[in-house]
Image (cartoon, coloured by chain):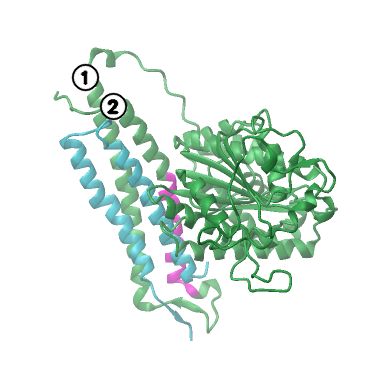
Chain colours: A cyan, B green
Amino acid sequence: MIITHSALGAAAAEIRSTEAHLSRVMEELTAAEIWSGADADRYRDEWNQLIRGRLLGAAAALEAVQLTTLV
Amino acid sequence: MARKMGMNPERVVAQAGMLSSGRDRLEHAVQSVEQLVAASLNPLSYAVQPGGLIIAPWSIAGTNVALMQVRAAMNDLNAFIGRAMGEAAQQRAASSAASLHATPTPRKPLSREDALKQLLDGELSQAEIARIWKESGLTPGDLEHLSPQQLAQLSMMDGLPAVARDKASRMLMDYALEHPDEAYKMLGFEDSDTSLKLFKQQIAALDDAVDEAEDRSKALKGTPAVQLVGLGNHDGALVAAISLGDLDTADRIAVNVPGMNSDLDGIANGSAAGAKVYEKAMESNLNSSYAIVAWYGYNSPGLAEVRSMDRADAGAKQLVGFLDGIQDSREGLGNSIENFSVLAHSYGSTTAAEALKFEDLRARIDDFVMYGSAGLENGTTVEQLKADSVHATAAAGDNLRWAGYTGGNRTDPHDITGVKTFSAEDVKDFERVTAHDMFTEDDGASFWNWGGKRGYLSEGTNSLYEIGKIVAGN
């Protein structure tokens, strides 16, 4: 594999897409009719801090990568 | 034990199961980042020559940070799934004595190796394919070691989740780019109408189309995933499908069927057209996710064959398998489809109509949209077409669609009772469609099209606007 802007962007997009999918499932999981209350709130807050934060951070890190020319 | 107020444990378990299916996707993302890290640390081992691009030294840490983050998220996800399951189990135990009743013995988990063997044995229904993929915990990474023949099998395996078909199809495409002579034979193109030269040309065109789709997706709202969901041989033609949007999770799916003279040389154009539909659907309903598939999955006719139903009948069987496969895999993954549309251009509408008339079709199609139709078989009724709503449009400036009617055995969908129609002309502030094309971009005026050549899914047309609304459910 040769590293390119396209490859970096594709990996970042894949991470963002996965994050969106997982977070949508998690939102449904903690919807009022499925699971509500303090435990559910804590679960959601920790999800946002840990999984969501890490995935978005990973995508941002890839998008910030710069390339240079081999001399 | 304290009762956890406000919990439906069965539904919590079901949702946790959906998180488990999302684990496969995350694992795939981890592998993608691992490859980037390897490439960034060892550029010379990938034969980068002076003048080629390498990662800037000050950016190497960026890929490592990303890898640490996605790996940590993977570990967290496993913990979160276990936690939700545990909370639900506690709730069940506390809530009633009924929870003590014996639960059905769970099916013995299938090992990944056995699951792959079953899939490759080729004797499973599409629903079984979807179930086995999910229950075995197979991931795209498990396909890395497969032979090109096995990848070809999985690439065209209807019912397999899109994330798996994408992996198999891309690996197969890479193999065909590197070993075209071997791939040509392996895919059965010897003695077909597809020459080796054409095969090489179309594989390269497909590779370019996927790259273009990925570039294009970055500018679209939601940055939709690009998936190559099939690569193979149908009746001697190289066929493939590109989805803009995640077919495994999108709320709304539209499969766009091209017409005569469509082949992989034109799949980039079909994918660009899909991006326009995606944009318009997003503009119409932002609170939904979409997957628009450019389905170049059948051997389409040339102009001389367009009066015949032969290509439509053969293509319809392929399309039925593809549509049913999407529905089966989504049911297997536990992700229902909110809206499922079939869009069809020119002879694609002839083909798609035959598919929607199939008795065995299981996919539940909400909307069937025909644009620039080359006609449906005489006697076709709306009731025969298994779609909740049937729509059609055609432009006065389209001088080619009539080729399909010259034998007298076709009916214009506009003349079929119950078909809803919309304009492709310059109504309101829209531009009129001036050609038969599915899509043209910024094509200037010519002798034949003095107003500029503009297809049905071109920017600024009412046909594109209306199709976007239909896909969006508005």
Magenta-span inclusion, residue B64? no
Please tell me which residue lies in front, B301 or B163: B301
In the image, the segment drawn in magenta is B24-43
Q: Which secondary structure, mark 1?
A: helix
Q: Which residue is mark 2?
A: B9
Along the line of sight, the residue nearer the viewer: B81 or B203: B203
Q: Residue furthest front?
A: B428
Residue B258 in picture, x, y percent from top left? 67, 52
**C-alpha distance separating marks 2 and 1:** 10 Å
Q: Amino acid at mark 2?
A: Pro
- Indicate which disc, 2 or 1, sits on the residue closer to the N terminus: 2
Left or right: residue B419 compared with residue A36 = right
- Does residue B174 sit above or below B286 in this rendering? below
Chain of the residue where label 1 is placed in the rendered structure: B
Q: Amino acid at mark 1?
A: Ser
Picture quarter containing residue B92? top left
The residue that appears at 36% across and 17% down in the rendered structure is B103
Can residue B36 be seen in this snapshot? yes
Disc number at residue B95? 1
Numbered disc 2: secondary structure? helix
Q: Is residue B232 left or right of residue B78?
A: right
Chain identifier of the residue bearing label 2 in the image: B
**Residue lying farthest to the left in this orientation:** B2
Residue depicted at 52% across the width and 55% down the height: B465
